[in-house]
Image (cartoon, rainbow, N blue to C red):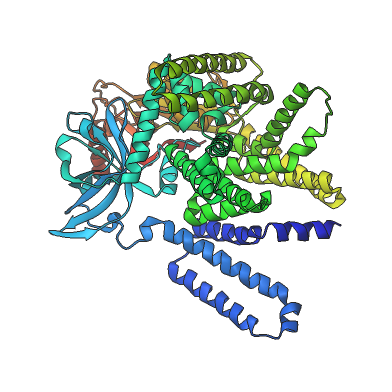
Amino acid sequence: MRKSYHIFIWKKAPFLRLLIPVLFGIIIQFYFKTEIAVICFFAVIFFTAYMIFSFLPEASRFRFRIIQGLIIFLFLTTFGSLITWQKDVRNHTNWYGKYDQQQSFIVATIDEPPAEKPKTFKAIAVAETVIHNGKQHRASGRFLIYFIKDSASQKLKYGCKIIFPVRKLVAIKNSGNPAAFDYAQYSAFQQIFQQAYLKKNDWKLLKENNASLYRNIVFETRDYILKTLQKNIDGADESSLAKALLIGYRLDLDKDLVQAYSNVGVVHLIAISGMHLALIYYFLVWLFAKIPVIKKSKFTRLIVVLSCLWFFSLLTGAPASVLRSAVMFTFIAIGDSFNKKAFIYNSLAVSAFLLLCYDPFMLWDVGFQLSYLAVLGIVIFQKYFYNWLSLKNKFLDEAWKLASVSLAAQLLTLPVCIYYFHQFPFLFLLSNMIAIPLSTLILWACIAIAILSPISFAALYLGKLAWAAIWLLNHFIVLIDSIPFSLWSGLSLPKSATMVLYLIFILFSFAFIRKNKTAFKFALVFVLIFTGMSVYKNFQLMSQKKMIVYNIPLNKAVDFIVRNKYCFIADPALSENSLLFDYNIKPARIFFMASSESALPGVLAKKNNFYQFYNSRILMIDTALNRFSVRTKVAVDYIIFSKNSLVNVADIASVFNCKKYIFDGSNSSWKIEQWKKECEELHLQFHSVPEQGAFVINL
């Protein structure tokens, strides 16, 4: 029975057999960076082996079919490596980064409407040509541009062509703070490796325009929808949430409100998930089934529905979760048109296979991972959760059905959520039970506003309905977030522990669903392994002693950490800036499990600007020091320079015998360069925090 079930799965979901080896190939290429010649060599070897195998007698092929399957598996693995190599724009011969930066100019097209920041306009640009030694060379690649706000940059829009020196492009760097968001890697997954900060005289607008008609329509439609929602829905929080719910526009959202949505487990509502696209799809099917001209032809209805569905996907910016849903609903629509019902596992495998062939680096997209895990959780577990209770009341039964969906989706996404977001919302079930129906009402109202906007009175009253629903939703989310036990935060789960936790989930699920004792025993073994990893981590915590000098622009920030306690030395304004704190310092404390603030009596002592931390002596300089002479140099382990202090390294070195000089992020780049030159001349060791990342020392 069990064997026939497995054969049934493989036959009904053949794309699983294609997806798994391609996944292996993508992962291998990402981590081991195999050269194209090696990839092609193995591809030829495996293809040749398959061709030779196909000429064998049928009886021999059947007898050694496992070998044939292995050859196909390895060939598809090399295919996964090949598409990953090809997608990396740095491997292209005409990538703009391969030209001499000092003597070249780059012509680029603004690839999206610039986003306004407090001091700049941010845009993604696409390289068109590189002018090198007076000759034009075709170029490829994308990069970020930050334009300083002025009269010229305000005129920039999608399709504008500009020219500027290639030397203005610099590599995207991380802050280097422990466990902080890896922005450089995040950008690299989007094939963006460099950025430029351009002042007025650094660039020139060209007369040509390189905008495509289709993308212009998309951007103009999105702009029209944003203005329509802004006009008809009162309140900054309410209108900004409507924009996020309908098309995923989140630039206007209040950061604290977004955090509240995340804390209660419903942030997926403002991230454009599969639920949004499902509502749009079934609305389109219902709508076009009512229009006489379209409903007569299945083919016409299919084309119109899919065109509208993909147009909406592009309006949202086409995140991974939306693309997954768009591909899935495309197959569902095709199947419905030909009276063929798709097998859900095969539909998931097909959509994943196609998306990864298009962009292999999507595999590391958090939205991609959460989207597929949530759908898998619903498909596998929802019916079992639903069968726990049998309710005769129709309303209660529908409520429990919704709750079972939330439970199933949460189960498989839980380890990933803890790994990325370091928290677990205890009241996610209650939040989803209220938030999903309200958000559905809001979404329908916003769609109606966008469609009926020419009828002003209809849009006005729909706007009032949407405002009331959003106001209620926001206040409900804030109320749940204010409950003390609603969130378990500060969770730290390493990548290895996350993988072990998934193995536990899979084995226990298989054991209970298929009544398999062997899987249950293996699950218990991995529970012991997971427990051992947790014990070892806590053992390491008992001996933890470290100092961290954080990389935060214009700010001084130092943590002394002992076990799970920390002492924070920083600018007073930094603690009040929640955005800087959450981005730079909070991840490090979660990673090192430093959860309790303390003066660290007995291990940390301060006298003037000197700190004694165990056996290490640290001097912090953020002002000018008085000159004084000494007969014997004072021994100091580390000297931290902050706030562009008016000191010379030579003067400091004449007084102190220091192991390493540290220049933190509160200093200007020109000042750090000056100190670095002095250190190099005096053969002194130094660490530039803005350039090298946070300085972390284990004692």
User: Looking at the picture, does residue 32 appear above or below residue 547?
Assistant: below
The percent position of residue 550, horizontal first and vertical second, equals 42, 31
**Left or right, residue 69 beside residue 253:** right
The percent position of residue 287, horizontal first and vertical second, equals 54, 35
| Label total for image | 0
Q: Is residue 529 visible?
A: no
Q: Nearer the viewer, residue 16 or 165?
A: 16
**Left or right, residue 332 beside residue 110:** right
In which quarter of the view is residue 659 placed?
top left
User: Looking at the picture, does residue 126 appear above or below residue 670?
Assistant: below
* Residue lying furthest left: 134
Quick one: quadrant of the N terminus?
bottom right
Image point (87%, 49%), residue name: 517
Image point (77%, 47%), residue name: 507
The percent position of residue 411, horizontal first and vertical second, equals 70, 36
Image point (47%, 45%), residue name: 307
**Left or right, residue 567 beside residue 455:** right
Q: Is residue 378 visible?
A: yes
The percent position of residue 326, horizontal first and vertical second, equals 53, 45
Q: Nearer the viewer, residue 508 or 501?
A: 508
User: Looking at the picture, does residue 106 appear above or below residue 570?
Assistant: below
